[in-house]
Amino acid sequence: MSTVIEAVAVSRAVGQPLDRIDGHAKVTGAARYAADAPIAAPLHAAIVQSTIPCGRIAAIDESAARNLAGVVEVLTYRNAPRVPVLSFDFTTPVTEELAPLQSDAIAYDGQHVAVVIAETFEAARAGATLLRIGYERREAEVSLDTARTIEHPEQWFGDDAQPRRGDPERAYNAAAVRVDATYTTPEETHNPLEPSVTVAEWRDGELTVYDATQWVRGTRAVLAKSFELDEEKVRVISPFLGGGFGCKGFFWPHPLIAAMAAKVTNRPVKLVLTREQMFTSCGYRSETRQRVRIGASREGRLQAILHDVLAESSRVGMFVESAGAVTTMLYDVSNIAVTHRIARLDVPTPTAMRAPGKAPGTYALGSALDELAYACGLDPLDVLRRNDAAVDRSSGLPFSSKQLLACYERGAEAFGWSARPKAPRAWREGGELVGWGVATATYPALRSPAQARVTLSTDGLVDVASATHDLGTGMYTILAQIAADELGVDPRAIRVRIGDSSFPVAPVAGGSMSSASVGPAVQDAARRAYHEAVAIATSSGESALHGLPERDVEARDGALRSKADPSRAVTYADLVRLGGSGAIEALGSAAPGDEDERLSFYSFGAQFVEVRFDEELARLRVSRALGVFDCGRILNPKTARSQMIGGIVWGIGMAMLEETVRDPRYGAVVTNNLADYHVPVNADVPDIDVLFVEEPDLAFNSLGARGVGEIGITGVAAAIANAVYHATGVRVRDLPIVPEKLLGAGPAAG
Amino acid sequence: MRAFEYVVAASSAAARTLAREVDGARFYAGGTTLVDLMKADVERPRRVIDISRLPLAAIEQRGDVVRIGALARNSDVAYDARIVLHFPAVSEALLSGASGQIRNAATIGGNLLQRTRCSYFRETRWRCNKREPGSGCDALDGFNRGHAVLGTSDSCIASYPGDLAVALCALSARVVVEGNDGERTIALDDLYVLPGEHPERETTLGPGELITAVELRAERLHERSHYLKIRDRASFEFALVSVACAVELDGKNIAQARLALGGVGTVPWRAREAEAALTGAPPGEAAFRRAAETALTGARTRAHNAYKVELAQRAIVRALRSVCGTGA
């Protein structure tokens, strides 16, 4: 503990709003994304996808495609290399038990059925349009409404998927005030700006893959198993990502297809998914139907919550949109029943999408609590406050650190909540109805074992390497900040290298756990390098610090110095020379221990939203948003704030715009482009403010930092829907809140 | 995208000759519709004739007629002082469309020929009578939230997507077309064709005919004009519903009115009966409401677009109130 406190005390760079160190490379185009892989003259691959939801391929006519100038090869199930079907586990994160191009069976619309490989991108795309594929279609189920195969998963990622405590039905039935409402959220699609990309090259039996992935190690493991190679013979490189949000987290089939294409043609191959293909090829957020029943006292004290979730998954992969997961711990309630039912449909497999489970779950629960507040005649914020959970009621464990009440207080004060009229439809300004809404944000604090290497070299360079990732979020920068503080150097003088499977192991960039996992590993590696440098400094006869005890040495301004006389100093470059081995290299590691047996780790927040509603035109706009977050120590307030703003913007999209529409006759996505799938544009985004209530969570890790990746979107949709009710008197229980759902919001409604 | 022949036209006459030589040739100006659809394999021109360098970009005023060259960029027209002064609805319509980047590329002539955003048209996997005559229409019983309620047929309910043409339609613009027999000028209304049983035919342009200009008459009526667009997000989206209107007041009554709708029709939808209902009436809620109801008479809705009738009516009332200056 003492070393931790010391590290915090001497901290300089951590906690500073440093500009991102990769920013210059990104805005000047120097940053090389997967599609910019430094591979000369690759072949180009274009994927062809099934246009039926269920059945088999009956005929393939490749002649026109093969006859097209520039087309080199066409791969289908008939001639693609054989690869095994793998099952998901945490070392081989395949999303589907369906290896690509291995059989004529079709499990969903949008399944990859062929790849056209050509000398140019244009020829590959043109060839893809010339491929003629005939199908035998079988009856498909593609809608939650008509689903016949419903599963009740016992567990999901280690958590009970059907948790219960107390006697929820009895408590609900006996409650003085009851809310019973069903909320629905549509399928949503990640839509990172950068589509999924793989560039694959085989050389001497070894495979190198430049892949837009949030998990280089996971991708490497699946590729190695698929081609029956040692993992050392596969290298996966992903230095920059143009967003991922979960759709580049687990392994999808396209990198395997690129590697097959490269193997068959014996040439490097570049494969870029089209925007349309991004809707079927790398997951989406499942639709949800959530029935929430709340029993409470007239004072709004919760007595029971029953939260039933129906979501979908495919026939070939299981994903549980765990919308009820945080219902068990978020409030102080003794009687809980959460169910998750999964309809197996003939659709692509859904996956984790920013704040998986929690984004739709906090919409339903946050809306239901708002409904409870009105049923009790209470201020919605008061209902949240008076049900605050002092301990995690799902486990009985105390929270490691929880500042949720402070988030409510700070937010209420900054937002001006006390001026809010109590009744709906009571506030008009400039011909518009105005409303305010609030909801709770939360996301679990997760952590995985990770390693990092810090290398000091004779040119004075400090190099940090780890197989982690930067989705555009600031990972490069915070790792430099962490190493800088341990070594007493300027963070801008540190070179951070990430996104390479040959670097020390790091987990998937998912679950908001990269900072909390990799940060401490970098800290450990930097400390080890520091101690090695100090050992050389105090033992080498040529060192100005020769003979000093270690405790009298400190790292500052790029050198080791005597605490008593800072002018007695040796630079790291000199120490590396004095050490005589060419470099000082240290491997650091960090891993969670058994602390989760004693403590519960979550981040929290409060979302405040103002909406304005033009009643005549059913035109709704978010005019103000404030998020107040408790995520432990904030490593970089600038990048963390940007993350939160991004999450809130996405919450606006989720609440009011985004919907992946699947035509129920065909099981195919209709809104598969960015003109029909609406994400917020700048004009939809109001002033957003972000505040942090910072309390270092040193029980969680040595940095005291929990993740900031996903919590930003949670609670936003509920806060907006609640603000809409406050403004209009209309409760929208079906996202997105598009104009036609508010057309009836006249004075007679509500 | 399939391979195509690309030729640069030296003159409008040469462009028309190049177009007549090959079936399915396409003129290329801004490319904002054509290139998209070529990527989607919906447009498959064997020859693309680049007319973007022809001298057809001027905006000129001769007497009370403002002539906008077909190659004038949307953004240049939107900010042109004469357009802003004499035809505010046109400027507003242009600025409500697309994004700044697209407006800088798109041309006035090309914009008039913008093709529908019907999802079932824009991907070759679906049945679409417009793309593939006789194949059927997947939109009729599909996801048709954005589709038309006026001017539809059993073959097609695709809505006309543009903004500019709706404003031009309300302001009785004329389109200058260069053809084999020289130049002809037609009312914008007469450019577009209802889908009927042949939704593949969208305009009255003949093979090799080229739009060279759009003409607008500067008059008092047009100065009091307005374009109102309603959509899900605040920018960069096609209209769910839009209204272009112009009103000339004569003392306390409406002397003349013009009304056109976007987002609800298979073509830019001029609401002449509603205009007649307004003429002579005192500007006010009763007249606006009556006009709104008249304008949507005959609307045929499908599963997801019934809201457009009510929304369009409200938008008409709002837009008329706005141009008449009759308060909130």
Image: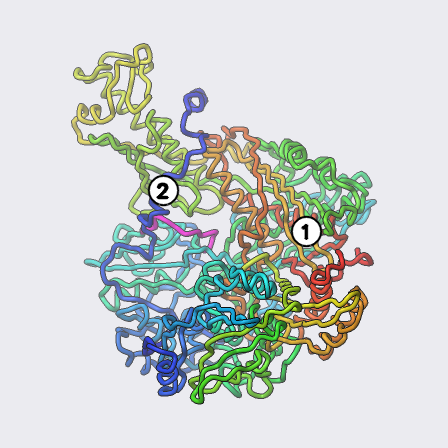
Task: Kindly state the secondary structure of the residue where label 1 is placed.
Answer: helix
Residue drawn at the location 66% of the way across and 35% of the way down: A408
Query: Which three-letter amino acid code belongs to the residue tagged 2?
Result: Asp
- The residue where tag 1 is placed is A721
Query: Looking at the picture, how far across and down is residue A259, in whole percent?
Result: 30, 62
Location of the C terminus of chain B by quadrant is bottom right
- When the figure is inspected, residue B206 is found, relative to residue A71, above or below; the finding is below
Region in magenta:
A237-247
Please say whether residue A483 is one of the residues in the magenta stretch: no
Query: Looking at the picture, how far across and down is residue A303, in whole percent?
Result: 75, 42
Binning the other alpha carbons within 10 Å of mark 2 as few (below 14), some (14 to 19) or many (20 upward) gives many
Q: Residue furthest front?
A: B63
Residue drawn at the location 50% of the way across and 36% of the way down: A706
Residue A2: image quadrant is top left
- The residue where tag 2 is placed is A22
Please say whether residue A239 is one of the residues in the magenta stretch: yes
Query: Which three-letter amino acid code belongs to the residue tagged 1?
Result: Ala
Question: Is residue B57 visible to the viewer in this orientation of the structure?
Answer: yes
Q: State left or right for residue A24 relative to residue A287.
A: left
Query: Looking at the picture, how far across and down is residue A99, in whole percent?
Result: 39, 65
Binning the other alpha carbons within 10 Å of mark 1 as few (below 14), some (14 to 19) or many (20 upward) gives many
Q: Residue furthest top?
A: A564
Q: Secondary structure of the magenta portion, mostly?
A: loop
Q: Chain of mark 1?
A: A
Disc with the residue nearer the chain's start (1 vs 2): 2
